[in-house]
Amino acid sequence: MKHTLAAIAICAAAPALAQDRMSLDQCVQSWDAVFGLTGLPIAQLQVDVDSSGWCVIQEGTFAIEVASRIRVDSLKWRASEIDRLISDGLPPRSIEIYGERLGVLPQTGDPVYDYLLGLQTRETEVDFGVSARWDGVQNAVVVDEGYVVFDETNRIDVTGRMEGVDLTDMASIQTSVGTMGLKSLELKATFDGWFEDYLALELGVAVLTKPDVAPEVQVAGLQQHAVGFIAEFPDAVLPDVARDALSAFIMDLPTPRGTLQVQLNADPVIGARRLAPLRFANAEQDQRDLLEIVLDGVRLLVTWSPTRE
């Protein structure tokens, strides 16, 4: 459990004002350390360091489970206080990771089928990046930059801040699980087909569960249910303009075309303590009253700018 928490924190934590230049030993050891924490076999890839002090892997493929592998054309990273990770399995103070043309390769055991799936996967590879840091004074993890680029017209950008996060040592990490929470989040997503390509199949299989009802009818019912649910949100949490925008976006699913922007702020943070009333809720409690308790101090602003009428 403690290794799982550390691995999660590594991805979320981490750029002080200036990143350290990485040595080749640090690059190799940090790569091995991440695999050690996740329990995956260490991928024996060529890890180098460039002239700017970035760790670099070119054209790498490595396993993430028995049935699939990850392929990436270029992966680079650097961090400050990377020895925390290498020596103690703790998140570094800061980290930057950038990748180009990342894709997941299914492994069926049939070499011909795997080859053909690999060709298909090339059309769905993405670029990504994350730059994040842990502020040990304020016990906050700040994501200064995060993005996924599918192609020129499909992209997700996100920044955010979590508070109550103490990454001093493993005991502190485990203790802060109960206090950490989301303080702020800004998201901008441009939709021009990525929802259908990457989410629709998995999401549809999970929610379209009535074989005797046409999928289109089920989708319409789910949309109406979702719109009705957000109508219950207090005005202080979701103003009318934001509610209308979010409702319009929902009604444009599963083929949205346009730009969605979301800004969330919470005081106190959204975490285990805030969500505790949901665990003890009963069927007799009014949904609006429960939402007012759980969402007190949360402000959610939404805009949806469709590119089609």
Image: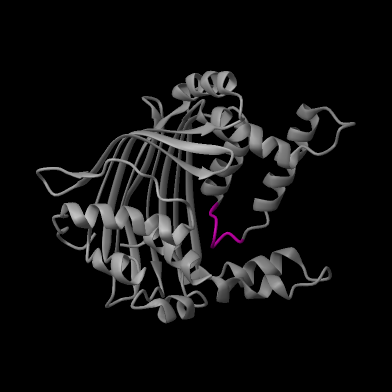
Q: Residue 9: x, y in percent?
A: 41, 64
Q: From this viewpoint, which residue is outermost toward the right?
A: 212
Q: On the rendered image, what quadrant is the C terminus found in?
A: top right
Q: Which residue is drawn at 72% across and 42% down?
A: 206
Is residue 253 visible to us here?
no
Above-or-below relation of 207 to 288: above
Q: Position of residue 307 (x, y in %)?
A: 47, 24
Is 51 situated left or right of 264 in this image?
left
- Magenta segment's dominant SS is loop
* Residue depicted at x 27% and y 78%: 137
How many numbered discs, if any? 0
Q: Quadrant of residue 274?
A: bottom right
38 w.r.t. 47: above or below: below
Q: Nearer the viewer, residue 245 or 87?
A: 87
Q: Is residue 177 left or right of residue 163?
A: right
Magenta stretch in the rendered image = 234-239
Q: Residue at x 83, y 68 (%)?
A: 283
> In the visual, does 5 lie left or right of 201?
left
Q: Which residue is drawn at 54% across and 41% down?
A: 245
Residue 152's x, y, as percent? Answer: 36, 25
121 or 241, nearer to the observer? 121
Magenta span includes 238: yes
Is residue 239 visible to the viewer in this orientation of the structure?
yes
In reply to whether residue 216 is colored magenta, the answer given is no
Foreground residue among 142 and 47? 47
Give x and y (percent) for residue 155: 40, 34
Which quadrant is the N terminus positioned in?
Answer: bottom right
- Image color mode: one colour
